[in-house]
Image: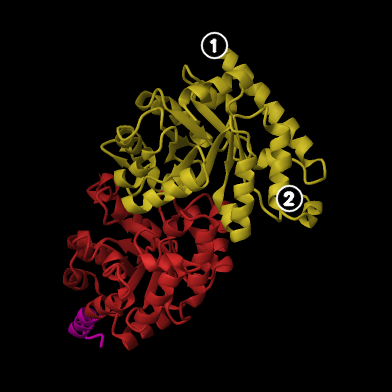
Chain colours: A red, B yellow
């Protein structure tokens, strides 16, 4: 998907919501366990009832890998089921030496046809570049993550500059704002203003709103740019809002609530 | 596998060789493409002819993932075929927020029964800890990698201390030398002495000897400890030493050559 198509979708749906498909057998409604592929059945119903409210879906690869080959089958079916005009993110946190990253790129962009993959920056330039070979595919590089351990190394300062800032500055030379995004956790929204000075145009994938305590209003205030430039992710808050048969309807209500807040922020910033 | 079992294996085989199974369809002998599962068939022959010379096998996950579900099947068959007394490494470079890393741990330690998995440190403590829940399983954390991009962030200094050093110091508190190893590239052997001051007892997984230019003698000189403390990996140099029908025999010759050098180093250090 191109940058332009993504922006058009945000404007049309009045939403910059990404729904995380962290689908686990012990979290989905019990009655689904009797179906042939409970993980896919759950995702399918979530997608059916939320696809007009979100602009991206983000399957969390670990949840599928933990189920072995059956999990990969559920993932492939889910990906095939997502409408083509919705941005797809393989949340995989990959990254390895060049020839190996090429193989990961092949796995996610050729074999599975995701629009994007999350990548860890620790191994540097040649671990990221192979993903850029594909047209209209995206690298979403970890910059500042929302988890507690995010501070262990990402905030270490060198010449007064935290590591994540160094990652932004160095890596933004590797790609463009049309093939690269960054992960910036909502729990660190106070740093978004600073981050926007370094990368004014890039899209940010922002986890941590809701369950983890980040505020959508803060994120929009400091992180939004003229094209929106944000994909705000919510996973558990939406998909597990109910553990009963009505899970997909309740997920829709929850997603609708967030979409309406997003619409307000988009209007506030004169994007709509 | 326990630390003691690994050390015993090193002494018995007079080897600290790890063979990387970076198995790709366009690199293996053509005649194998007619078999039902060419990737497994290749690995099987390599394992048959090298299992007495190495102490570990390291499938590189990207190569299997790039083939989709068939690749995962080849990987599972390969893992099942490796003798139980040989250490197995899922070279996966995973790492994510706690509940997600738990899923990766489940994937590699329960579903696939690997002895260890390589993990990227960028997301900090809670991205690594879930792997320690399993007894006699290991995290192999990236510290200083052998690729060109390894210098982009790993060498950034804070208070005169490079990031990889900070990773070693901080993370060595998270686990023990019985459930944690580190990746240190052979191309940075000059830094091994310094690294050994921080982590005298931990095992190091060392890629980059051979093809990438690192020297086994240098690695042993600066990196070996009283229990050996090294797993030196070679992938392409061994498994692709010949592209003909004799590939497994030639791989054996190459592995034997390295094993004999390793034996010399073990004798030199009074480990044998």
Other-residue count near label 2 (Cα within 10 Å), few / some / many at <14 / 14–19 / ≥20? many
Rounded to the nearest angstrom, the CA distance separating label 2 from label 1 is 39 Å
Q: Position of residue B61 (x, y in %)?
A: 55, 50
Please, what secondary structure does the residue beneath circle 2 have?
Answer: loop
Q: A156 left or right of A25?
A: left
Quarter of the image that includes the C terminus of chain B = top right
Please check the rendered image and state whether residue B15 is part of the magenta-colored stretch, yes or no.
Answer: no
Which chain does tag 2 point to? B
Q: Main secondary structure of the magenta part?
A: helix
Magenta-drawn stretch contains A267: yes
Q: Which residues are magenta?
A: A259-272
User: Which residue does the image show at 29% across and 36% down from the upper left?
Assistant: B170
| Circle 2 residue | B28
Where residue B196 appears, x then y in whole percent?
A: 41, 25
Residue located at (53% from left, 39% from top): B89
Of the two numbered discs 2 and 1 on the same chain, state the one appearing first in sequence. 2
In the rendered image, residue B111, in percent from the top left (x then y), is placed at 50, 48
Q: Which mark is residue B270?
A: 1
Residue occupying image coordinates x 59% and y 13%: B267
Q: Is residue A137 above or below residue B58?
A: below
Q: Chain of mark 1?
A: B
Q: Which element is circle 1 on?
A: loop
Query: Going 29% across and 65% down the picture, which residue do you hit?
Result: A236
């Amino acid at each position: 998907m191109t940058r332009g198509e993504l922006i058009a979708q945000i404007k049309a749906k009045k939403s910059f919501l990404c729904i995380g498909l962290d689908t686990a057998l012990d979290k989905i409604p019990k009655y689904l366990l009797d179906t042939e592929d409970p993980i896919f059945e759950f995702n399918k119903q979530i997608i059916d009832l939320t696809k007009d409210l979100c602009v991206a879906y983000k399957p969390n690869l670990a949840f599928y890998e933990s189920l072995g080959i059956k999990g990969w089958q559920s993932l492939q079916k889910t990906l095939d089921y997502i409408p083509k005009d919705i941005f797809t993110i393989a949340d995989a946190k990959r990254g390895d030496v060049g020839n190996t990253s090429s193989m990961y790129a092949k796995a996610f962009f050729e074999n599975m046809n995701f629009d994007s993959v999350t990548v860890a920056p620790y191994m540097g330039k040649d671990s990221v570049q192979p993903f850029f070979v594909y047209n209209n595919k995206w690298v979403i590089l970890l910059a500042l993550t929302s988890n507690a351990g995010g501070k262990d190394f990402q905030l270490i300062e060198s010449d007064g500059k935290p590591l994540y800032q160094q990652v932004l500055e160095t890596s933004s030379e590797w790609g463009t704002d049309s093939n690269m995004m960054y992960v910036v956790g909502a729990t660190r929204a106070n740093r978004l203003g600073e981050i926007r000075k370094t990368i004014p145009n890039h899209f940010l994938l922002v986890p941590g709103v809701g369950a983890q305590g980040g505020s959508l209003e803060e994120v929009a205030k400091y992180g939004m740019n003229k094209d929106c430039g944000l994909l705000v992710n919510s996973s558990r808050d939406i998909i597990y809002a109910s553990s009963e048969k009505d899970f997909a309807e309740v997920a829709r209500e929850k997603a609708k609530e967030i979409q309406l807040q997003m619409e307000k922020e988009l209007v506030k910033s004169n994007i709509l």
